[in-house]
Amino acid sequence: MTPITFWFDPVSPYAALAFERLPAALAGCSCVVDYRPVLLAGLLKHWGQLGPAEIAPKRDWTYRQVAWRARVQGSALQLPAAHPFNPLPLLRLLVACGVDGRPNRRQCERVLEHVWHGGAAADDPARLAALTAALAPPRDPRSEAVKQALRSHTDAAIARGVFGVPTLELPPPPGGTAPRLFFGDDALDMAAACLRGDPWFETGWEAAANRPVAVQRPR
């Protein structure tokens, strides 16, 4: 089976939508999914980006589009009471739950539903305590080892070229060295086509990105 990695941060509504649709999108593909929590803020800082919620008009659009996409997808997704919020306690809980800091799908589902179902505050201390008790992680989410593991996940994502979440990582093609990265909940079908051997990926993948830069905006 092909090993693939699902990089995500529960702060992202697109990660929640992609997580819900992932089994259907990959139906019939011989693969195993490794769920890897990362700090989106760390990715954004490294690549010099602002998050969608940090640009006022884009924030409005994001919430409208997410509500629409959830409706079309038949998802119960609902925005939390306030967004964005600090996702670190949830990320550390996920890392504390999993073997080598890699939670299983059920654990990821519980955390994403905590945020994106019901409309409550994702960072409410009482709710966080109840979620932690329900998941019963074998490690203390507040421990330095867990914090370091989350930093290591984020560094590993950056090293692979991950710039946002959700990102689905597929192994390099035969003879290649770089993994194939599919960003966004709307890229799941593209990733599935690659897994199923769509011939476009033999030449189209590299050709599409092989473009000279005509001008660069000063920073």
Image (cartoon, grey):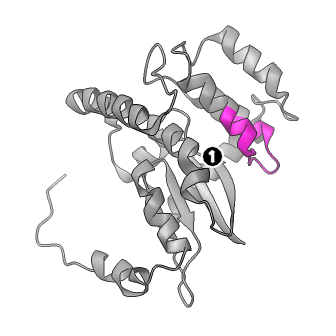
> Is the residue 104 above or below the residue 81 in the image?
below
Residue type at mark 1 is Arg
- Name the side, left or right, on which 126 lies relative to 58: right
User: Range of the magenta residues?
Assistant: 94-109
**142 in the magenta segment:** no
Q: Is residue 53 above or below residue 177?
A: above
Write the residue at 42% across / 57% down.
187
Residue 136: x, y in percent?
A: 85, 27
Residue 20, position as x, y percentages in the image:
57, 41
* Picture quadrant where residue 127 is located: top right
Residue found at the very far right of the displayed protein = 138
- Neighbor class of circle 1 (other Cα within 10 Å; few <14, some 14-19, many 20+) is some
Q: Residue at x 37, y 33 (%)?
A: 66
In what quadrant of the picture does the N terminus appear? bottom right
User: Residue, x 53% and y 58% (percent of image)?
Assistant: 168
Residue at image position (75%, 36%) is 144
| The residue positioned farthest toward the top in the image shown | 126
Q: Check disc 1 and report the residue beneath it.
A: 151
Q: Would you place residue 149 above or below residue 59 in this image?
A: below
